[in-house]
Image (spheres, helix red, strand yellow):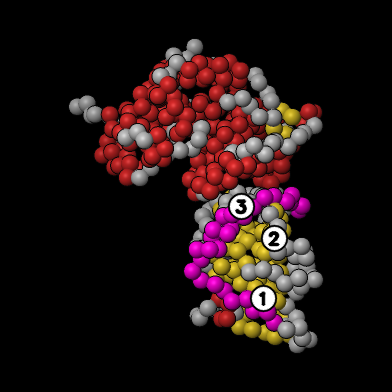
Amino acid sequence: MTRDHAVIEELLAIRSLGGLDGDDVERLERELAAHGDCEECRRLTDEYAETAGRLGFALDPTPVDLEQANEILRRATHPATQDAAPPPSVLPTDELGARRSRRGRMWPALVVAAAVVVLVISAVAILGPGRSTEVTVSTSQTVVGFTGDTGELAMAYEPGRPGALFVGSGFPDPGSDKVYAIWMLQGSTAVSGGCVRPHDGSIVAFVDADLADADRMAVTVEPSSCPSQPTSAPVLISDPLVA
Amino acid sequence: MEAIDLAEARDRELVQGIRRRDEEAFRGLFGRYAPSARSLAMRVVRQSHLAEEIVQEAFMALWRNPAAYDDQRGSVKSWLMGMVHHRAVDLVRREESYRRRAERSAQQETDREMDPADEVVEQIGLPEERRRVRAALDELPEAQRDVLERMYFDGMSQTQIAEATGLPLGTVKSRTLLGMRRLRSALIQEEP
């Protein structure tokens, strides 16, 4: 018996161009599932994917630095979690503003007075009830919170000195090929502070970076290659840093 | 898609080399397709640094998992460009604001200047490919070409195109199908 592939073909053609959305995404899956082991479905899938892939060659090529290939190989061979000297880049600051404006929760900035006493605080204050990780924070340090759409995060640092400790909880797994990237924002530019993966939803990380010029910190979700420039909008932004 | 030309045969050899962890093979494929991949990513996301990241991410995926390419399902070049396109579209879908920002700054954005000695635009086989694809697109009725270009090059979904053009969604779909059928016929079913 010959099955009708009209609907599948139309949806596959649209999907191959990246245009499928809404209910049609599930509709295509249902149709394909209904056809089961369908040679014609595979043929249509492959041929439309092949056709779509060829369209990109209509554009004039852009010169590319061959050194990028070597950089990819270096990163693949030595998967560092922090780029040595990341170039500054433009962060989507208008997106930052938009996200900040629609945030529902605000982490109160805890500015601790300078003192010589070292205070060991329970991370309960940062991670919330039920967490037991202990974090040592000197009273000469400043603690700032982050606000956004993902998890709870706080950062402790000592103004005028490099390095910052990040403690957070409630972070969803970003996926096997993704990490959370920490950025130091300097005006409209972002400098990488490295990448971390949460463990059981928690993050405890020390970033050995100079925060002297940073106005705020931000967190984005990035490919596990830990790019030197942000490729997505921030999921968390810190309160202003104290100089 | 049974018959393959010499360029495709060479590409498959390079992928085989990458499976053997041959870095020269990787550089060869990068030099051959990164310029076109960069153009495609740039066209969709409209920001050069994002386009560069997308291309690097796609080639990183190739190096890490060359077995993902199945030579029974299509050409290396189409598979590579598909990876780049998917990443670019995914990015603009997640962050539509990128597009708005990019359109505002499109006039200001220029690719960084590079030492010509560092530039790679390997064109073996590609001018002919470009000519064929452009000719196939030019053969399409304008209404079909417009929908396809919005969808593929501008990263718009079928719904967004319907909203932007005022066309019924069904018309967008049918034009896409008819256009893609013509392109499929011109680009794969009648390959030399």
| Disc 3, SS | loop
Residue at image mark 1: A143
| Disc 1, SS | strand
Horizontal side of A12 relative to A91 (left or right) equals left
Disc 2 vs disc 3: which is toward the camera? 3
Determine the CA span between mark 1 and mark 3. 25 Å
Q: Earlier in the sequence, mark 2 or mark 3?
A: 3
Q: Label 1 crowding class (10 Å Cα cut-off): few <14, some 14-19, many 20+?
A: many
Q: Earlier in the sequence, mark 1 or mark 2?
A: 1
Residue at image mark 3: A92
Considering only vertical position in the picture, is A121 above or below A59?
below
Considering only vertical position in the picture, is A72 above or below A60?
below
Q: Amino acid at mark 2?
A: Met
Q: Amino acid at mark 3?
A: Pro
Q: Which residue is depicted at the point 68% across and 54% down?
A: A188
Picture coordinates of residue A64 (x, y %)? Answer: 69, 32
Determine the CA span between mark 2 and mark 3. 13 Å
Taking the magenta stretch, the answer to whether it contains residue B26 is: no
